[in-house]
Image (spheres, helix red, strand yellow):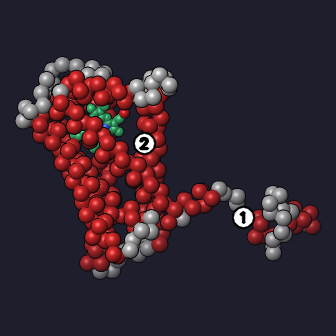
Amino acid sequence: MAQTQETLRKPVNSRQSRAPVTGTALAVRKQRSFLADLYSTAVGKKYAMAISGIAMMGFVLFHMLGNLKMYLGAAELDQYAEFLKKLLYPLAPKGAVLWILRGGLLAMLALHLHAAWSLTVLNHQARPVKYQSARDYEVANFASRTMRYSGMIVASFLIWHLLDLTFGVVNSVGTEGEFVTGEVYANVVRSLDRWPVAAFYILANLLLGIHLRHGAWSIFQSLGWNNPRFNSWRWAFATAFALVVVVGNISFPIAVLAGIVKV
Ligand code: HEM
């Protein structure tokens, strides 16, 4: 017993030279990094949502801008896709930078989903009893419920989208011709020429717009930049950002269905 108490009183590392008040205090203390400590709090999870959200906002904006090249023709869009593969080539091997960017994007997506899920768990723990008034419930939860559902639908769209235009698995279903890696323009036209697919792209992008608008607004709140004086500016930014991405993205299936973009 005397030896156990002696062990508990020993400092766990050299930096911790002062003896704790009780042995128990030291025994339950876990060594965690600053970031892990921060992420275990609701504030830390909100930071994680905001930072990963900003990274993905950057991606969707530049992805849409890059896809505008389809209005310039097949050669331009295909060349642009090739340019992305050759980023920093020959300094870095062909495709290496693109794969690093893909890895970063995937990590951001995983962090965003995990933080959203664990914030929901924290909220349930903090409020195990539901709101008593249906009106309060609606007011308090409308935005967050919309975020959850729009987020889940956009995530399932993304799975379809990758199977369609990156891996080509579903690109040729219900249409003539085959998916060819590198022939990005032809792959896009073949895909969006199918009206149910085009409709799904339009619906998913409308939901992405709702998600982006609320997300872009919330980022400022999560990062603590929420002075009421800037509220109108925040709404203007969030609305403009969501509109630019959605209008650009929705124009692609419409242009293909209308025969403006064709092979
Ligand atoms: C109508 C709108 C869209 C079109 C026409 C489009 C087009 C494309 C194309 C052609 C590719 C393959 C590029 C290549 O192989 O070089 C691609 C990949 C991808 N798209 Fe989209 N996209 C659209 C909307 C979106 C949206 C809304 C998101 C995100 C929510 C998204 C996320 C991605 C991702 C993550 C990839 C994989 C990127 C990579 O592997 O390098 N796309 N998209």
Q: Amino acid at mark 2?
A: Leu
Residue placed farthest to the bottom in the image?
Answer: 133
Left or right side of 248 for 222: right
| Element assignment for label 1 | loop
| Residue 37 screen position, x and y as percent | 60, 61
Residue 38 placement (x, y as % from top left) = 57, 61
Residue 250 percent coordinates (x, y): 17, 44
Callout 2 secondary element: helix
Residue at the location (20% across, 25% down)? 74
The answer to whether residue 143 is seen in the rendering is: no
Q: Nearer the viewer, mark 1 or mark 2?
A: 2
The quadrant of the picture showing ligand 1 is top left
Q: Residues within 10 Å of mark 1 (few under 14, many from 20)?
A: few
Q: Quadrant of residue 101?
A: top left
Quarter of the rendering containing residue 188: top left
Q: Residue at x 46, y 31 (%)?
A: 97
Residue 11 visible: yes
* Vertical side of 1 occupied by 62: above or below: above
Query: Is the residue marked 2 within 8 Å of ligand 1, measured from its CB?
Result: yes
202 sits to left or right of 147: left
Label number found at residue 29? 1
Residue holding disc 2? 105
* Three-letter amino acid code of the residue under disc 1: Arg
Place of residue 18 in the rendered image (x, y in percent of width and height, measured from the top left)? 83, 69
